[in-house]
Amino acid sequence: MNAHYRYAAVLCLGLLAAPATAKPPVCKVLPPDIKEAMRNMSFCMTVADPVAECGRTGMDVQVFGNDEGKLPNPSRGQEYWEGKIRHDGAAGTRRLVYLMTMGARKNIVERRYYTPDHYATFCQIN
């Protein structure tokens, strides 16, 4: 293998090993209604049917594809779920996004994120 091909192979391997994104910063302050929504979503995402349970609290939840690539890639067996924050009956630009391990008996919240601007920026909730 000549030097040019070796360099290309090393470059490609380095790109494959690089993380998808940097870790979002920690949220400094959350609005009170987001804190309330977070408590509701943290509970309803752990039950067997999170869509129905979250719906009872007025929150729409669904699988979040991370198409923007702004959150770290989930590990095997994990997926992101988003909860739409409603204001005056309408879903605006604010979302909670949870990294979940979905189990046969129990779902586990691994990490929580907040986006105030429809996925343009994220912060991690501790």
Image (cartoon, rainbow, N blue to C red):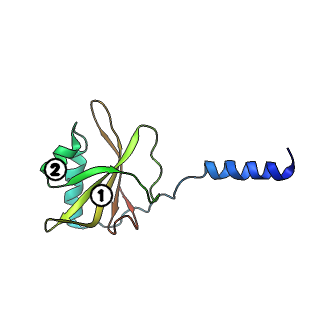
Q: Position of residue 73 (x, y in %)?
A: 47, 49
Q: Position of residue 65 (x, y in %)?
A: 39, 52
Is 89 on the left or on the right of 116, as rendered? left
Is 103 on the left or on the right of 54, as rendered? right
Q: Can you tell which of label 1 and label 2 is closer to the viewer?
A: 2
Secondary structure under tag 1 reads strand
Q: Nearer the viewer, residue 63 or 98?
A: 63
Q: Is 110 located above or below residue 31 in the figure? A: above
Quadrant containing the N terminus is top right
Three-letter amino acid code at disc 2?
A: Gly
Q: How packed is label 2: few (under 14 Cα within 10 Å), some, or many (20 or more)?
A: few
Compute the Cα span from label 1 to label 2.
15 Å
Q: Is label 1 in contact with label 2 (beta carbons under 8 Å)? A: no
Q: Residue at x 16, y 50 (%)?
A: 55
Q: Residue at x 18, y 49 (%)?
A: 54
Q: Residue at x 62, y 48 (%)?
A: 17
Mark carried by residue 96: 1
Q: Is 24 located above or below residue 7 in the figure? A: below
Quadrant containing the C terminus is bottom left
Three-letter amino acid code at disc 1?
A: Leu
What residue did someone put label 2 on? 55
